[in-house]
Image (cartoon, rainbow, N blue to C red):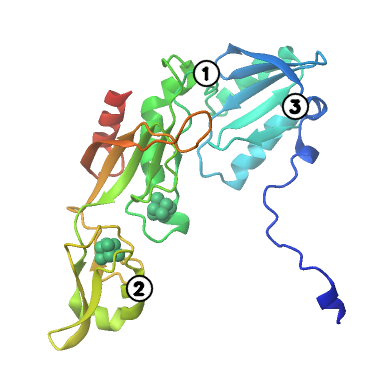
Amino acid sequence: MSEAKAMPRRPDEVGVPDPFPFMHPVLKKNYGQWAWHDRPRPGVLHHVAKSGDEVWTVRAGTQRQMDVLTIRKLCAIADEYAEGHVRFTTRSNIEFMVSSFEKVPALIHKLQSEGFPVGGTGNSVSMISHTQGWLHCDIPGTDASGVVKSLMDLLHKEFISEEMPNRVHITTSCCQVNCGGQGDISINVQYTKPPKINHDLIANICERPTVVARCPVAAIRPAMVNGKPSLEVDEKKCICCGACYPPCPPMQINGADSTKLAIWVGGKHSNARSRPAFHKLVVANLPNNPPRWPEVAEVVRKVL
Ligand code: SF4
Ligand code: SF4
């Protein structure tokens, strides 16, 4: 047996990195040994360990799509004001940990002066998470991050003042697959009509078997139209998902009259503590109206 065969195959996908080398020393020392915590002010959590050690966590929002210069700025703030440690939450908040309450006011002042809102620890509207289909996926109907920017401008006060009756998570997704939609209010793009086919372009641009295979409900069939090979859609079967558009742009589904936004509320995605539940649709057919999506913002404001 060759040496290569004798060696077990090593995975090249290793999952979440080991957090301990990067963890604040107080968190590392007291990992899993916390006695209690409180929230001395919006944006700050205070944890006390069974050992008596204390740590204060200051949370701030970011712009979601992070550039290198901003990451360097956050690291410089961590070095100067927060004992050299910063971490990101799943909602793209940043958190700085300090082992003395005296360091908290200067850290908050620095974050706010650099434009990072401090908040999101209590009953607030959290940072709005969203899918980034326009970066990595092939069926987005709009730029979900633009909707997020508009809403966060509107709801900024609810993040920093923490005066909501309860915590609220909002998400936006760029199609009805809603792959980022673990929110109390979920805003999704919806296509409302089957694709209109540009038969003149199909033969030149599309691989018809690929397009046929792409449809999840087998609504697309090869067809001859005006003597040319093309496709046809069974509109009774079509669920307007948009999956045929990326491999074949002549399947035109993203017109201004057929790309809308829908808002769903409630639901529960995990089975922790109680059973999962579906969202409920509250509003559909809102216009996809960049750059500020005012109709969507108005509905979210009313729901809140
Ligand atoms: S919501 Fe839809 S378009 Fe956006 S990333 Fe998820 S699957 Fe892709
Ligand atoms: S929009 Fe979706 S369901 Fe309709 S034809 Fe295209 S792939 Fe099939």
User: With respect to residue 102, does 203 lie above or below?
Assistant: below
C-alpha span from label 3 to label 1: 22 Å
Residue pointed to by mark 1 = 122
The 10 Å Cα crowd at callout 3, few under 14, some 14 to 19, many 20 or more, is few
Say if mark 2 contacts mark 3, CB within 8 Å. Answer: no
Can residue 166 be seen by looking at this rendering?
yes
Kind of residue at badge 1: Gly
Can you tell which quarter of the image residue 4 is in? bottom right
Q: Is residue 229 left or right of residue 10?
A: left
Q: Write the residue at 42% across / 21% down.
A: 158
Going from the N terminus, do you reach mark 1 or mark 2 first?
1
Q: Write the residue at 57% across / 29% down.
A: 114
* SS at badge 2: helix
* SS at badge 1: loop
Going from the N terminus, do you reach mark 2 or mark 3 first?
3
What is the x, y in percent for residue 157? 42, 20
C-alpha span from label 1 to label 2: 48 Å
159 and 74: which is toward the camera: 159
Please state which of the two labelled residues, at mark 3 or mark 1, is closer to the viewer.
Answer: 3
Q: Is residue 64 left or right of residue 143?
A: right
- The N terminus sits in image quarter: bottom right
User: With respect to residue 276, does 156 lie above or below?
Assistant: above
Can you tell which quarter of the image residue 246 is in? bottom left
What is the x, y in percent for residue 42? 54, 16
What is the x, y in percent for residue 231? 22, 77
Q: Which mark is residue 32?
A: 3
Say if mark 1 contacts mark 2, CB within 8 Å. Answer: no
* SS at badge 3: loop
Residue pointed to by mark 2 = 213
Q: Is residue 240 left or right of residue 183?
A: left
C-alpha span from label 2 to label 3: 50 Å
Kind of residue at badge 3: Gly
